[in-house]
Amino acid sequence: MNPTDRLDRYTAALRFAERQVARLIEKHPDFFPIYTVQGRWHHAGQLWTDWTGGFLAGMMWQFHRRTGDACWRERAEHYSRLLEHRQHDRNVHDLGFIFLNTYRPWYQLTGDPRLHAVLIQAGRTLAMRFQERGQYLCSFIGPESLFIDIMMNVPLILYAANETGDEELRRVAVAHCRTTRERIVRPDGSTAHEGIFDTGTGEFLRESTHQGLSAHSAWARGLAWSLYGYSQVYELSGLEEFREVAERNAGYWLSHLPEDGVPYWDFDADLTQPPPYGAQKESSAGAIAASGLLHLAQQTPSPEQAEVYRGAALRTLDALVSPDYLADSTPDWEGILKHGVYHTEKQLGVDESVMWGEFFLVEALTRAVTLPGGMR
Ligand code: GLY
């Protein structure tokens, strides 16, 4: 795609995203959906875990930042406020997803100390998940479980550490990132979804999964969480060792992608088999990785590597804004991005729109249209 067409197409996709979010909140006020069923946000399907509120509100902040539209700011503040009580939520490991995409942009805009206090409290609450034996933040499953997804949430603890100078918060965050790297990031750059530990001794027992194909497979979204998570952790900690992990993840990612740059749900899926366990695309992983690669492109010391990351991110985004994935030409589809997957084994949100896919598509497109030097 030439740069002018790309800019037009990405901008049109962002406008479509605004329309879909406006439509959702008008139809279902104060409702935080997780995934669609046959393209509809409101249904009786279970949540599994309640972790995605920050993505809906976060898109509103993205829209406001890009357009300056006061109406989006008003909506963003309202929906962020609805999440404020989650700063004390000890039942999930997802407080980074919830607060970094809402209270952080709100605080950056206003400098209001009350908003700052919410962010710091959320970081402290998340840090309470730390298991001294084993040196990791445990997942919502229980004290024995470490998820790769937590790499996207641990930046909230580092943020709180940087803002307060609290060395204990930094210790916990850095230890978690090192344990994750040692235990569930593999030498080839792929990742396991979960690590299981002996809670009595802290000993690492085995790889495991909930949402991937198998314990030892490479679940696409988990790898995208790792790539983007380590890139953010590098930014917030200044520790090169974490950029190196993100680059290792990126190496696996780039060498295993199909032609259109949008992964199948698990890199070990048998593509000769039909969905959902076989050839099922996972657009949300593509959107997360595209945003993460654009971030990593600004961090890698190699200009050639930066070009590779940028080019790969744009290739994926080119596909995601095509009618194959973007719902703009699918009548009555309420989401923005089709062909996401939430939980294959539980049959939740398979081949549907998922709220984090929406958010990371918006974030990546917003990043792409404001790239320094434009989109080559
Ligand atoms: N539970 C986080 C995810 O589905 O990626």
Image: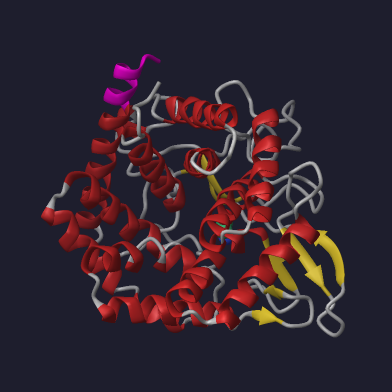
Residue at point 39%, 29% (across, down): 321
Residue 353 lies in quadrant: top left
Q: Is residue 355 above or below residue 310?
A: below
Q: Is residue 38 above or below residue 347?
A: above
Is residue 3 on the magenta stretch? Answer: yes
Determine the quadrant in which ligand 1 lies.
Answer: bottom right
Where residue 51 appears, x then y in whole percent? 48, 66
Q: Is residue 230 above or below residue 267?
A: below
Depth check: 15 or 249 in front?
Answer: 249
| Image quarter (top left, top right, bottom left or bottom right) of the C terminus | top left
Q: Is residue 48 visible?
A: no
How many marks do you count on the picture? 0
Is residue 29 on the magenta stretch? Answer: no
Depth check: 326 or 162 in front?
Answer: 162
| Image quarter (top left, top right, bottom left or bottom right) of the N terminus | top left
Give the dominant element type of the magenta stretch: helix, strand or loop.
helix
Residue at point 37%, 25% (across, down): 375
Magenta segment boundaries in residue numbering: 1-9
Residue 221 as seen in the image, left or right of residue 317: right
Q: Is residue 198 above or below residue 283?
A: below
Residue at point 53%, 27% (across, down): 307
Q: How is the image coloured?
A: secondary structure
Residue 45 as seen in the image, left or right of residue 74: right
Residue at point 33%, 68% (across, down): 103
Depth check: 306 or 316 in front?
Answer: 306
Q: Is residue 315 visible?
A: yes
Where residue 130 appears, x then y in whole percent? 66, 79
Where residue 284 appears, x then y in whole percent? 50, 43
Among all residues in the image, which is located at the extreme left?
70
Where residue 106 appears, x then y in whole percent? 27, 65
